[in-house]
Amino acid sequence: MGVFVFLPLVLPLTAWPVARLAEQRLHPRTATRLLTGVAAVMAACSTVCLGLLMVVGTAQLPGNPLPDGWSDPEVRQAVPYDEVAGRAAIPALCAVALVCGRTLWRHGRVRRGAHRTLAGLPGTEVAVLPDAVPYAYALPGGHRDRIVVTTALLDSLEPAERRALFAHERAHLAARHHRHLLAVQLAARANPFLRPLRTAVAYTAERWADEEAAAVVGSRRTVALAIGKAALVSRGTPLATLAGLASAGPVPRRVAALLGPAPVGRRWPSVFTAVGLAVWGAAAGTAVSAMASANSAVTMIFILHAATPL
């Protein structure tokens, strides 16, 4: 394996250019899916890399329950600087498991708490809360997706802007944006180099919902006004893991995008453009990371199998 075993840990750096260019040049739908996929694959590869390093490090510890053959020189030679890398991977992988588990637990707790808040209200698609704090968010559920909005926010919007609000939240639910947001959050926890992708997806998911709402309402200006008003009167979505009208992404950029021409949907940009180079570079980095992880995993399995007595 050699130094290739370390590649998945640093290859997420290749995704940084696409994180910025994709949110500016690609259609928000394409950018959201692309960045989420890149983040998920690279996070999985870096976690596999840490797992392989931990096997080597754990096998050398005295009193470990692993077969003695796993600490043979043949196994240790498969990883450069095995003593340092192996031992460092143990707390690193434990930290990844801890923070990812905490993120999943917090996400579930927020959703369960939001559903409990709606207990006793009519089971309609839109749940209106008599609250003096203006906010709105999309709440996915196992049996019924709902839109939560307060009377304070509805009172601050005109009828056309309310339609834009509901169309925006329905777009979040229809596209299952909460899954994209959760995936990039977990990826950023697994590898801090992927944090720019998490920020980019939070923005492109909102832009995706903005464009869907503009198509439903038939007026990009109306959606822009609704976003601007909601951002001025509200403090954003009070639940950080749920998507809302004015919850994520720089609002001025979203409004400016809506006041400009509609984005053109393109599958893959030309490699001879700046965004094309970034997209294809990120794709190449993801492919190399996946292949390096697969090669390291298969090689380590064969080595450990050969070192394990029957």
Image (cartoon, rainbow, N blue to C red):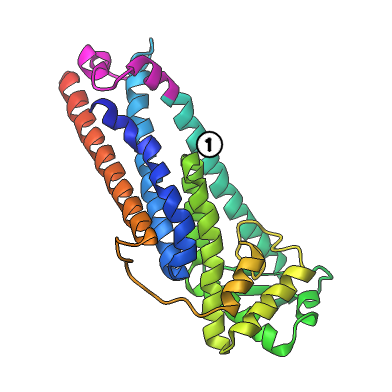
Between 69 and 138, the residue placed more toward the observer is 138
Question: Residue 172: where, in percent of width, then height?
Answer: 54, 71
Residue, disc 1: 98
Between 40 and 286, the residue placed more toward the observer is 286
Q: Secondary structure at mark 1?
A: helix
Between 83 and 95, the residue placed more toward the observer is 83
Does residue 115 sit above or below 220 in this rendering?
A: above
| Residue 242 falls within the magenta-colored stretch | no
State the extent of the magenta-drawn residues as a range: 66-88
Residue at 32% x, 46% y: name it.
285
Q: Is residue 180 left or right of residue 103?
A: left
> What secondary structure do most residues of the magenta stretch adopt?
helix
Q: Residue furthest right?
A: 132
Question: Residue 131: where, in percent of width, then height?
Answer: 81, 71
Q: Residue furthest top?
A: 62
Residue at 39% x, 36% y: name it.
10
Q: Residues within 10 Å of mark 1 (few under 14, many from 20)?
A: few
